[in-house]
Structure formats: C-alpha cells, structure tokens
Amino acid sequence: MKLDVNSGVPIYLQIIEQIKNSILYGHYRGGDRIQPVRELAISLRVNPNTVAKAYRILQEEGWLESRPGGGNFIVEQTDEKVVFKREETLRDELAAVIRKAELLGVEPKQLSGILVELLNKRGEE
C-alpha cells in the first residue's frame, strides 16, 4: 500500500480506497485477515488512529468485520454486491474522466469517439 501525502486526500480515505480496490480486484477475498492496525500504521508510517479510523469506516460500510481477539477480516461479498460495487467504482472513475474532458474542452461526442476507439483497440489485442 502506498500513500500520497501531497494529493490533498486525507490518509484515512486513501487507506479505505486502497483496501476497497484490493477487494474489488480480487487481491483480498472474503474471510481474509488484513494487517492489524498497529502493523499497518508502522508500515505506512502513520498514526495508528488514522488506520483505526479507516478500518472503522470500512466496518460500518460492510467491507470489514472485527473479531474480538482475532483481528479484522474481509467480509464475504455476494456476487451481486461485488458487481454493483465494481460498477459504482467504474462510474466514479468515468465521471472523473468526463470532468477532466470538460476542463480540457473535449466535447461529449469527441469523448465518446475516443472511448469507442480505445475499446476497439482492446478488442484487437
């Protein structure tokens, strides 16, 4: 896990995002134990309270569960929930691309053409 202290995004939100992405991309699976708070805090060189806050939010959102004396574990996600969360993540990323395109003066039709072109290239590989 890598943090960008210059991004303007709070560290705890970066931790949350990276753990969610690790789950969505299959690096973590339901039932996997994740690093203890103190261990992750040491490896990231951040305050343990920052990691604890990220874990607490992930628990509230249903991504993690805490087992007394056992640590924190990835919650088993249903296929429908994973598909929904993957689509939601993709929509968020595409929305950011659309905002960036608008700032660059790219018209929606141009952007659509670029996306089709890139998708066609992927299909040829």
Image (cartoon, rainbow, N blue to C red):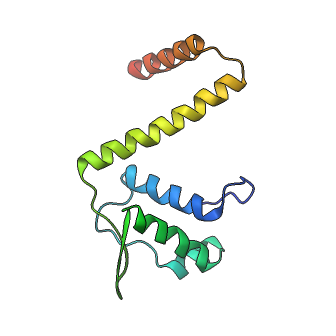
Q: Is residue 116 above or below residue 75?
A: above
Going by the image, does 125 lie left or right of 97?
left
- The number of numbered discs placed on residues in the rendered structure image is 0
Q: Quadrant of the N terminus?
A: bottom right
Residue drawn at x 43%, y 16% is 120
Where residue 21 sits in the image (x, y, percent)?
46, 52
53 sits left or right of 102 in the view: left
Q: Position of residue 80 (x, y in %)?
A: 25, 45
The answer to whether residue 70 is above or below residue 46 is: below
Left or right relative to 82: residue 60: right
Say left or right for 83 vs 96: left
The residue at the far bottom in this view is: 69
Would residue 1 be visible to someone looking at this image?
Answer: no
Which residue in the rendered view is the most extreme toward the front? 60
Q: Quadrant of residue 114?
A: top right
Image height check: is 12 above or below 68?
above
In terms of image quadrants, where is residue 45? bottom right
Q: Quadrant of the C terminus?
A: top left
Q: Residue furthest right?
A: 6
Q: Nearer the viewer, residue 59 or 44?
A: 59
Q: Residue at x 64, y 60 (%)?
A: 3
Residue 46 in percent (x, y) is at 65, 74
User: Is residue 54 visible in the rendered structure shown here?
Assistant: yes
> Considering only vertical position in the picture, is 47 above or below 32?
below
- The spot of residue 75 in percent (x, y) is 31, 64
Which one is nearer the viewer's eye here, 13 or 124?
13
In-front residue for pair 68/21: 68
Residue at image position (72%, 54%) is 8
Which residue is located at x 39 percent, y 38 percent?
87
